[in-house]
Image: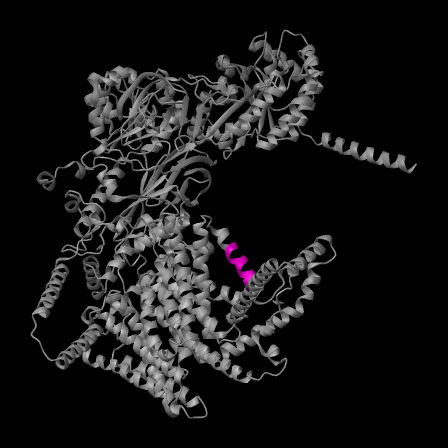
Amino acid sequence: MVAVTMMAVIFFLFMFSQVMKESGNDYEVNKYAKEEPVKAAAWKSAVVDCSTGTQQALPQDWQNRRYVAFVGDTSSNVGSIVSQWALYAKRNMMTCRDVYEIEKEKYGKPEFVIIDSTVVDFEKDFPALKKFTEDGLSLIFCNLPSPDVIENNPDLMYLLGIQYVAYRNYKVEGYHLFGGFLLGGETLYKVKEEKDEKRQDLELNIPWYVTLGGTKTYMVGMLEDSPLGEEEARNEYLPGLIWRNSLGDSQVIVVNGDFMSTTTGLGILNAMVYELSTYQIYPVVNAQNTLLTNYPLMTNENADEMQRIYERSAFAVETDIIWPRLISLAEKSKLKYTTFLAPRYDYASGLEWDPSYYAAFLGMFNEREVETGMSLQYLNSTLTEKTKQDEQFLLALEKRYKTSSAFIDKSEINNVSALTGDSFYLKDLRTIACDADIKIPILSYLDDDITLQSLTSTTRDFTYSEDLMLKSIETALGYNNAKLNLEAVIWPNGKADQWENIYDDMSSALDTYWKPFEKFDQTTLTESDERVRTFLNLDYSEKREGDVIKLNVSGTDGKSSWFILRTHGEEIKSISGGGFERIENATYLIRADEEEISIELRSVKASATFK
Amino acid sequence: MSMTLLTGFQILGAFASFFVISIILPHFVIGKSLRFVNRYERALFYTAAGNFFVMNLVSILELLHISNCVTLILGTIIPAVLIKARLEHIDLQQKLLKLLALGRRITSGEARFRAIRLNGEKERKRQRAEIFKTITNVYLKNLPDVLLVLAVIGGAFYFFGTHCLEQYAYKASDILVHNYWINGLNDNKIFIAGIYPFGMHMTLYYIHQVFRIDVYVLLRIFSVVQYIWVCLMLVCVLKLCCKSRFTPYIGAFLYIAADFFVKSTYGRYAATLPLEFGMMFVLPAVYFGFGYFKEQKKEVLEAKQAAEATEVPLEGEQKQDSPESEYEEIDYSIPKIKIPLIINPKLRTIRRKLTGGLRRCFKKFADHARGLKKTFVKLNCHSTMYLAGFGMSFAATLIVHFYDTIGLAFMCIGMAMGFIGFLFRKQYFKKVILTCLVSLFLAILPMAVAFAAGTPLQGSLGWAMDVIKGSDKGTLASMAANTTADTGVVAAAPASAESPLNAPISIPDDVLAKMLENQAQSQPVEEKKEEAPKVPLTERLKEAGSKAFQSFLKGFDEYVLKKNDKESRRILLLFIPAMLLLGLVFQVGPWKDSHYGMIMLSTAFSIIIMGIMLSAKSFGLPRLMEPSRTSIFLACTIAMGVALFADSILYLLCRFMRTRVPMDVLSAVCLVVLILFCAKNGIIRDRLRTGGQITNSAITCLTNIIRKEKDFTWTICSANDENRMAEEHGFHYETITFLRGMETNGTLGYIRIPTQTVFFFIEKIPVEYYKTYPGAGQSVSAAGADHSLCPSMGLAPYVAENRWITMSRMYYWAEAFKKLYPNETTVYFESDDFICYRVEQNTYRLFNFAIDYDYNTRIYPEELEE
């Protein structure tokens, strides 16, 4: 009798706690979507195009702001990257297609000149380039002309800091990115084990330039054995990929490769500015998002395959197999997920969705720090048709989650604005994520209400060029938007798509490639949206007096904003108006809580006193 | 904490470390065995034994190439415990078993720490009471002495130590070489630059390894410790020789503070040099010699009396009295050998011969065993103990510096003359010679082993031999050294062929002229001697005597006594004949205290001998040591002699008083009067002040680098000195090599330094490195840089005007490089006279430091002439 009573009590206690948990689970509330988002008021850089040949009036506030001159085509990939960088770095920009078009007299001296070599005739333009260096103007070559052009022009070689051209085209083993240039530290992009071969997607056939004394190199090609002589087998003779040459008061930075025509160029430009200055402070987003697309599904799709592989239904796979692992990974790496719920993925399947799944998943997510967005991806349908069907599903629900984020195919970005007006469940949408594309800015306002956050990395099949891009974007924006395709688990294309393999890939990517950036905040997409808006809206100015940097921030609407401070060996002694955290050697993440921030630095010097 | 305070703490640390070696460790091992001697004698024994042990331990481990912190600590603890157990008859095995049993009980839970602690409470209480009693007895009852010893330490520090707080650099050129040799010991390379007495190096190396004090720190500040120790040894010896309580401090005062002696007699104490380190063993050796004669005389007398008493020994009496009875009696009787009876007479003869042979054999063995036992018993005699002390001190001087042995030899000759009545007696002479031979053997052995293994002799040994032989090479070198000694600059011994200091330091013209003049004067004298007309023998003897006396006085005037007010100070020398007289007075009559008298005589003779050696050539004697070095020993002996002289007067006056109090009071009065007299008449020495060969800022900067930067991730590019100082922590690049690497080539040169950080030390106001020049003190400038670099090798580019040119060039290079690499080149340290640039580079892609900084690509008229 006693035993029965005890069992009943225990049963009651368990049931009671579960009932309490479920009744108190307000899963329909989106904690991350605030009532009043930061208004869209993006700062825009003033752009002057000198190549039109017409005299233009100086834009307002031109004289008070630094500007960069770009020699090249703004519609090219390089031009697109430079424009994006100028926007994010809060700089005005002068563009032209001929170095002789740069009008220093009218527009003042630019901070530096960025040159796309494809539009430069080095025979004709060299005197102008030389004149720039003599005037103390620094040059950034986003790419180089062919080795023949360089070899036939010793003056150009001297200007570029090239001692000689060892090979016009040589296959290197990999790249060696030195520490202190991009955030994330030193990295070797070289295949050591067979399994890494698929990761090597860098351009290995490069012209081999041996740099001069007085240069500083940031990235080189790696070789097993040097074909040059014994003396030239030293590291100093390895083919340079990015280097800096000092010519009196001017510095020339050279990129030997195609890095500047991808988003990798953003961080490289930032790192170059750092190398050209005694210190650098610039705004960043400080957000690290992990997106789980098409997860969860509300239908039991691909049931036979799921049964065969996992001996479970799709729903059971998602709850019993995927979710526990995701949770352990999140706890280990302190991740915050944004899941993109898909009522149905294959709209031709005709399967009925189960509304009970909705409450179950949302309740589960609500217990963890997970935001739920809507997936606007689909199979065998159109976007309009999909949203209509999804509406039906959502209308049938008792409680509905307020969706503020969504994931969409990049081809359908332009349709989003129309959808938000038509569809009731998308009216609260604030931010959209989509796959990366060179023509789509990483961060931008899609319209007055919605921001666009492109993907910056993936958790699967992470290649060397993606890692270089990740480092670069983290350097430029302190931002990462990584996607894990979970529809692949339900619709596998082979063994590689099985959950254990996907999990292994994701786990190793988190432990290795993302690890250097763990000092940045983990955010959901809506949280990140808040920071992106602040980042896009803000404007800043800074001034150094002795050891103190005075930073003035405006346009944040009272919200905190983040900056990265990079010094050359100096450390932060104190800060007022915000806080700071050390990311890596001589690199700090600054949080600006007020409009005026004062940062006191101390240099690493010997002292006459000892501890 | 400022650099001055840090240096102060470093001195304290070095003193404490040396105290452990010289007092604490020997006290632990032989403290109980030396219970019967007084504390001053114990201090002498401890110093000799501790240092002798450390030196031998290091040489053994170094020769075996296993020397490091662990082996040194084990090599100290294990022998110390074993010797202690042997001397105090401790059963180590039993102790160990007890300890193991205790461990077992604790681990099995049978016993608890608390219970064990409570059991030991009684013992601890007893120990605490004993310590308290010792403090009361030793320190409180002897408070005046304690205070005076502290005053001696304080005085020695004030006059000879405070300069270290003002000038952080090395104070002598050859310290860099010693630094190099000690660094060699760190790599288990003893005699790295050839065979040389390594005593000081081994002691400093031991302190460095065991107490973790950097070698460059020790070489900067250990001079203070060694000088304090020399003074303490002087006080101990005088306390043991003098009869009154406070006269020893007269000697200490004269030696430390009174301004009677020329700077060359004490100037070298500013630097951590072997000769001065060895001084701390010279006086103890002399005292052990005195002690030996005293105890041996007593023992011989006792033996004689015992022999007389045992002429008709009572049965069983000898067995009880003889020292052998303390030890287990061994049956040495010849065993009976049973050989079968053989009738054949031939065979019988053989048997007899065989038995006889065997018996003789056993008898010889028995005699030998008895002899060994007797020897062992004798080791426990006091005289043997003094001989052991003498042997260890003698060997220590030989291990540290041959000149210390020569100085000690002068004193030993004086001692031999003082104790001439005893020395040549069989009971004395044999033991003394044996001791000398054993210590000589022990001291030479490591060097001999190394020599046998193919290590050549170090270069300066040849130089020392030249001095001893009196050859030209030695003469010129010594004359240069004498000149520098007179001007107060620490004389530099020629360095080894391998050392960076081997470069020819050009001798100033005036010095060269003086040397040539001296040589010119000495040669015609010899020629004149041959041509001199014959004069009567008495006249010649008189003339020779007068000449000798004049030379004797001249030696004192030139090398020992201060030159101003010479005549009045010569009066001081009158105490020498007075000492001789008093020494004789104490041999006979009512004041008879022959041992005390002999000490007086020995000291006086020592002073005379060293005085003669100052002008050895005038006396037709070989000059065994440079006069400037002899004067160091002489000044110490004079201080000792004056104290003894004052003591003997007081002793003479108060000999027959029943109590010592009047004598002690008078001695205190004498001490106070002397101090007041000297103070009133301005005969108090100035604090020793020295100039370093690098700036204080450079040392401060170096200390920063060593303390803050990770070892071997940096290189210092500087002019010479930091080369050895930082050898254990980082790398070094010579400034002149660096500049020459890009001379005329500009960027086509190739200079890469493969460390992450490179520091460039530049003197904005170049120091006067061993040589001054008309523009000395000027700062680096474009005018300085606009000269060709000195083409000579060695130190020449760092001396005089060349240093200004080198530093100016370096400064303009740094500024040009900073322009090329503005973010990578920072000013790490800057003061009015010094600047240090820091360059951070990527070790995978090193900077080429060879650049065109304008001055290196110019063509200079000097180069065109060439």
Q: Is residue A520 above or below residue B239?
A: above
Q: Quadrant of the N terminus of chain B?
A: bottom left
Q: Is residue B759 above or below residue A462?
A: below
- Relative horizontal placement of residue B543, taking residue B692 as reference (left or right): left
Q: Which residue is at a point 51% across and 58% down the rendered structure image?
A: B76
- Relative horizontal placement of residue A447, taking residue B750 as reference (left or right): right
- Relative horizontal placement of residue A228, taking residue B365 as reference (left or right): left
Q: Quadrant of the C terminus of chain B?
A: top left
Q: Which of the 4 image quarters holds residue B253? A: bottom left
Q: Foreground: A195 or B794?
A: B794
Q: Which of the 4 image quarters holds residue A477? A: top left
| Colour mapping | one colour
Counting from the top left corner in percent of width and height, residue A285 is at: 46, 30
Q: Foreground: B66 or B686?
A: B66
Q: Decide whether the magenta segment is chiefly helix, strand or loop.
A: helix
The answer to if A375 sits in the magenta stretch is no
Residue A60 showing in the rendered view: no
Q: Foreground: B690 or A209?
A: B690
Which residue ends up furthest to the right in the rendered image?
A: A1
First to last magenta residue range:
B74-83
Counting from the top left corner in percent of width and height, residue B391 is at: 42, 67
Counting from the top left corner in percent of width and height, residue B794 is at: 23, 47
